[in-house]
Image (tube, rainbow, N blue to C red):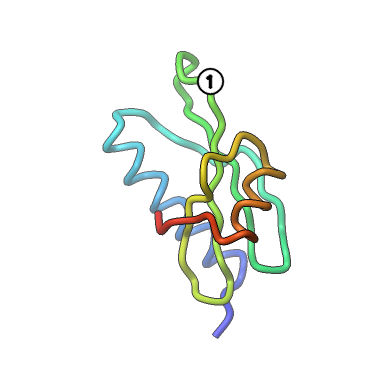
Amino acid sequence: MTFDYNAAEIAVLEVLARAGNELGVQLQIAEVIEQDFGWVFLYESLDPKLAATAAVVFDKADGLVYIPGQATSMDAAIEQYRGGNKSRA
């Protein structure tokens, strides 16, 4: 079974809401890049004190959200994910 973008967005928003609640901040999707394996979602905090951007990956083959290793950019997140450096979100 493969998953579409709508499923990906819903899953990622759930992960961001859960993480935001744990951190006490509101997180939002900032950018999305489609890849052959699924979508890479860059997200950021709405709190201006937390200006960092991070990435999660939705894999359309298994419908799961992953956190690439210590990615510092969209390209790094993609390379790390392709290299197997990932964990479940």
The furthest residue to the top: 49
Secondary-structure class at tag 1: loop
The furthest residue to the bottom: 1
On the picture, is 84 further left or further right than 10?
right
Q: Is residue 76 above or below residue 65?
A: above
Q: Quadrant of the C terminus?
A: bottom left
Residue 49 image position (x, y, % from top left): 46, 14
Residue type beneath disc 1: Ala
Q: Toward the viewer: 72 or 42?
A: 72
Residue that label 1 marks: 51
On the picture, is 81 further left or further right than 45?
right
Residue 66 image position (x, y, % from top left): 48, 57
At horizontal 60% and vertical 57% (from top left) the residue drawn is 81
At horizontal 61% and vertical 52% (from top left) the residue drawn is 80
Q: Is residue 43 above or below residue 61?
A: above
How many marks do you count on the picture?
1
Q: Quadrant of the N terminus?
A: bottom right
Q: Is residue 34 above or below residue 77?
A: below
At horizontal 71% and vertical 58% (from top left) the residue drawn is 34
Task: Determine the image quadrant of residue 25.
Answer: top left
At horizontal 56% and vertical 31% (from top left) the residue drawn is 53
Residue 39 image position (x, y, % from top left): 64, 58
Q: Is residue 14 above or below residue 51?
A: below
